[in-house]
Amino acid sequence: MILFSIVLILLLGFFSGQIAQRIGAPPLMGMIIVGILLGSEVSNLIDSGVIELADELRTIAVMVILMRAGLGLDRDKLIKQGNVALRLGILPAITEMLVVAVVAVWLFQFNFVTGLLLGCVVSAESPAVIVPGMLRLKNLGWGVTKGIPDAILTGSALSDVLILLLFSLLLNFLGQSAINSNALWLLPLQVISQVILGVIIGYLAAKLIVWFVVKQQWTQNTVQNTLIVASLALLIVVLAKEYPYFSGYLSAMAMGFFLIEFSPPLARKLRTEFNHLWIAAEIILFVLMGATIQLKVLENVLLSGILLLVIGLVFGRTIGWYLATVGSNWHWREKLFLLPGNSAKATVQAAIGAIPLSQGIPGGEIILAVAALSILITAPLGAWAIPTFAPKLLTKNPVDPTKTNITTKTILLAAIDTSDIAIQVLTKVGDLARRSNGEIIVVHVKNNSSELEIINLQKLTNKLLLDIPHQFITINGSIPEEIITLAQEYQVTDIVMGQTGHQLPEKILLGSVSQAVLETSSIPVILVSNQK
């Protein structure tokens, strides 16, 4: 039954995300809704064993997104925006937490310490929404010159470290008969020590990986590299829960960051593989998040919970954003981007929202309901708002390919005629497409070609490119002009065409098709010779 539940989560989570995306909503919204429908509140189709493993599965998902964040950080941009990133890691969360605590005393009649506990849950930022959103902006070049995505990524990680420490301390206070006020003075030291030790452990882990994988070459392929790195990152996160002297989340993120510094080629390969891992991790994270939401309790605090979230955002987090960016080189539009870019709540709320209730803290059911409400409102809103408002508020800059994944796909154009060289052109372009996982546009300008010749060319194309996505296009007109027009229309990365004779490219006769394309095309041209 556990296996059946996992299959349901993956399949329904994937298709619900795709449906949500096709109607213009964030994919995670569809996944959360499926989680609610599969959970105990509706159909109860998720096995209790999976629910018991939910925390562990969420930990794996969080590890994946933190490694993705670390592997996407840019040291130069962080040095440039380090002060802003540090303030973003402290001030918005603290100001929102304090405002939420005051409002909770008024709305729910909490004592102030319980209000602070609720403030910790509400003010934590979601790496599950912010990390993919910021990495996508880096891929597209939005705000990268000033390091805005990097500052938000780093600030979000530091913020969650601080909030989790505060949450743990407040939970211990509420579990005691009296509050030990002296422990409050130790909090800054605890935060500093967890951050410093977290970075050191991430540094040492990255050194260890590079020594084994790159220098000693104990692994043979990228899959093994990813297995080793993911396992070590997960081990660090798990050990941090058992021995809370350092931040495991920060260590995982730091490990990814230092891997870029120690071995950029390894980091580039890992960046791609962790993006693949996130496909499954995202589904599991958000479906299980929806499955744990208690709808009845949510209904009871709906209006008051929304009011609390709005006041916390307007009078808490906004003040923190302003203080964090005072004196920076961000202009007002970039500061305004923090509203959609730094508000989402999901992962931490899902991880800690139910803990007060499970430990018998008075008001725990309200804390859980408000945590669920914050997820349902801000997670889909943030996932939609980040890509929507980035083009309106940020400046697009050139992308650094060493720090991110280029999102453009490889499309090759093969120009063939009815001569024997068509086989070599198709063979060459097929080899290039297989190496780059690309697609192919095959074009034949059919001015004087017979119908039988065109049919034979199409059969040859389908035979040699059987395993590659391709289109076969026939047109009339000037051969060089039509080739270049199609190449621009399909935004191809390279043009592949035949070169007849034994001459070198620089010796091609003026006026030939290949010479004309070489002279007029702004797209790279690859010539295939018919030499034996």
Image (cartoon, rainbow, N blue to C red):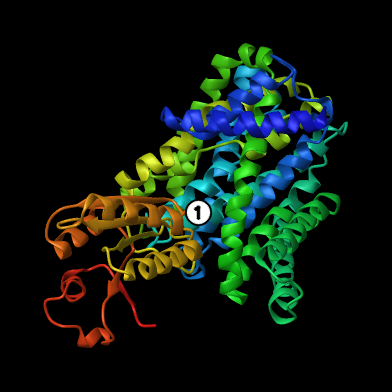
Residue drawn at x 31%, y 50% as measured from the top left: 455
Measured as percent of width and height from the top left, residue 91 is found at: 54, 48
Residue drawn at x 59%, y 38% as measured from the top left: 123
The amino acid at mark 1 is: Asp
**Mark 1 burial class by Cα count in 10 Å: few <14, some 14-19, many 20+:** few
Taking depth in this image into account, of 416 and 494 the one nearest to the observer is 416
Taking depth in this image into account, of 54 and 279 the one nearest to the observer is 279
Taking depth in this image into account, of 227 and 349 the one nearest to the observer is 227
**Does residue 529 appear left or right of residue 90 in this picture?**
left
Q: Is residue 465 above or below residue 293?
A: below
Residue drawn at x 73%, y 20% as measured from the top left: 365
**Does residue 153 appear left or right of residue 222 in this picture?**
left
Q: Quadrant of the C terminus?
A: bottom left
Measured as percent of width and height from the top left, residue 424 is found at: 38, 70
Measured as percent of width and height from the top left, residue 501 is found at: 26, 82
Q: Is residue 112 above or below residue 421?
A: above
Q: Quadrant of the N terminus?
A: top right
Question: Which residue is farthest right?
Answer: 177
Measured as percent of width and height from the top left, residue 16 is found at: 55, 28
**Does residue 298 appear left or right of residue 183 in this picture?**
left
Residue drawn at x 69%, y 51% as measured from the top left: 63
**Does residue 272 appear in this view?**
yes
Quadrant housing residue 80: bottom left
Say which residue label 1 marks. 467
